[in-house]
């Protein structure tokens, strides 16, 4: 079937692009870590600076502070509930209910093996 061959070719292209993107992200993250170490003493968060690219264009870069929250896991929910509720059975019942009542979306897809 022609469509299956086309799907495989598209899937291979996506895999190549994803690999390339992963490598680019890793390189960008390493450069960012290095740059932040160098400039953190000179520039305060929230301040911006301008740089000139090799093609002569000007780019403005801003160092910002971000907050990243840990994932909302059942272990975290259970730990938090134990700070509020003393009844272990009640906590277990809440966790069990949350696990059982999660919406499950079922779908079909193709997968190369």
Image (spheres, rainbow, N blue to C red):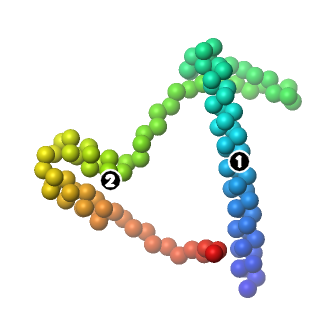
Tell me the distance, in whole angstroms, between the alpha carbons under discs 2 and 1. 32 Å
Label 1 neighbourhood size at 10 Å, few (<14), some (14-19), many (20+)? Answer: few
**In the rendered structure, which disc, 2 or 1, sits on the residue that comes first in sequence?**
1
Mark 2 sits on what residue? 74
Specify the quadrant of the image occupied by residue 38.
top right
Q: Is residue 71 above or below residue 32?
A: below
**In this view of the protein, can residue 48 be seen by the observer?**
no
Q: Is residue 61 above or below residue 70?
A: above
Specify the quadrant of the image occupied by residue 36.
top right
Mark 1 sits on what residue? 23
The x, y position of residue 52, in whole percent, is 80, 23
At a point 70% along the width and 25% down the height, the residue shown is: 60
Q: Is residue 103 above or below residue 48?
A: below
**In this view of the protein, can residue 103 be seen by the observer?**
yes
The x, y position of residue 1, in whole percent, is 73, 85
Is label 2 in a helix, a strand or a loop?
Answer: helix
């Amino acid at each position: 079937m022609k469509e299956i061959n086309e799907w495989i070719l598209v899937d291979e292209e996506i895999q190549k692009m994803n690999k390339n993107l992963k490598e680019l992200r890793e390189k960008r993250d390493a450069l960012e870590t290095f740059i932040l170490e160098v400039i953190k003493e000179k520039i305060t968060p929230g301040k911006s600076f301008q740089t000139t690219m090799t093609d002569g264009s000007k780019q403005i870069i801003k160092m910002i502070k971000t907050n990243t929250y840990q994932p909302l896991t059942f272990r975290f929910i259970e730990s938090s509930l134990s700070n509020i509720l003393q009844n272990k059975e009640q906590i277990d019942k809440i966790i069990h209910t949350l696990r059982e009542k999660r919406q499950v979306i079922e779908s079909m897809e193709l997968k190369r093996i």
